[in-house]
Image (cartoon, grey):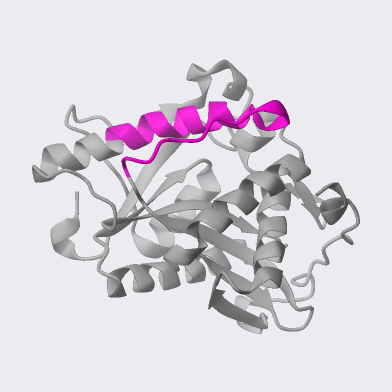
Amino acid sequence: MDTVLIKEKPFPDITLHLESPSQLNLKYEVLEENDEELILDSVKCLAETFTGMDISGKEIYEPMVKACGLSKDDMFQFVLEYLKASVNDGLSFVAKDKTIDRVVAVVACENFNPDEEAPIFEGSLSPMNKVMEFLGEINERFISTIEYKTGKKVEKNEYVHAFMAGSRLGKFKSYVIAKLVELIMKKGKENGYKGVFAEATNIKSSKVLTDYHDFHLVIDKHDMPILKEYSSVEIFSKIPKEVATDCRILYKALKPEYDI
């Protein structure tokens, strides 16, 4: 796996001379199990943007992964296993630039199974256990809140879990991620899901969901927002406050009756 990322050429900033997202030459499509080339480039996109990559002098990274010090190769393996396990749900979408024939953005999702246990990671991937433990705590609050407000147990095939989003674009990241989320919401509604939720780990990802698609912060039975402060866990306390202060559950009902 090492050579997969190390030998990759620097990703070009295809937006450098563009003035509007309407000038982008993108194809939006769902990830499918038999398209190994598209899956591989999608994995690279997420591994690079989560651990840190430079686009036109600006570093892009996911704060929790960056705080854990995970390498690109470790993250590559994590994302690859995640997509292999979830791709058949048909809920992960990518944006691909037609000119350079490369993936420029990914939103990876799954059919949420509340009874599924998080895997235990070992070796150089062991810091991911801290991430999953942190996310698991707010997910448990989300599940209990739904059950409290609806009086029904949360089951598989009810909610889309938007788990990872990343973009290699220099500009118009929010626009393209929002387009992918729009496709996910459409697919989710067609397939009978009740809603889409995400753990928004930074300010920018929160704004994409709230500003473009009216996702909202979920309030639990104690009238408290479902979020967890990074300062509460030592490994994440070094995340810059201008990047994010917390990770929060954001939710969008796919029909009015499923709002919570």
Residue 259 on the magenta span? no
Q: Is residue 239 above or below residue 79?
A: above
Where residue 61 appears, as percent x and y from the top left, is 68, 45
- x then y, percent, for residue 125: 67, 32
Q: Nearer the viewer, residue 237 or 159?
A: 159
Name the foreground residue: 9 vs 25: 9
Residue 115 is a magenta residue: yes
- Number of marks present in the image shown: 0
Residue 122 seen: yes
Examine the rendered structure and indicate whether residue 222 appears above or below residue 172.
above
Q: Residue at x 56, y 28 (%)?
A: 129
Residue 146 in which image quadrant? top left
Left or right? Give the position of 159 relative to 248: left
Image height of 15 relative to 72, above or below: below
Where is residue 210, by image quadrant?
A: bottom left
Q: What segment carries the magenta color?
A: 114-141
Furthest-left residue in this view: 151
Main secondary structure type of the part rendered in magenta = helix
Query: Would residue 61 be visible to someone looking at this image?
Result: no
Q: Is residue 231 left or right of residue 57?
A: left
Q: Position of residue 219 (x, y in %)?
A: 24, 37
Residue 164, horizontal then vertical, whole percent: 54, 51
- What residue is shown at x 73% (from left), y 51% (from top)? 48
**Residue occupying image coordinates x 34% and y 59%:** 214
The correct choice, above or below, for 46 with respect to 247 in the image is: below
Q: Is residue 9 left or right of residue 256?
A: right
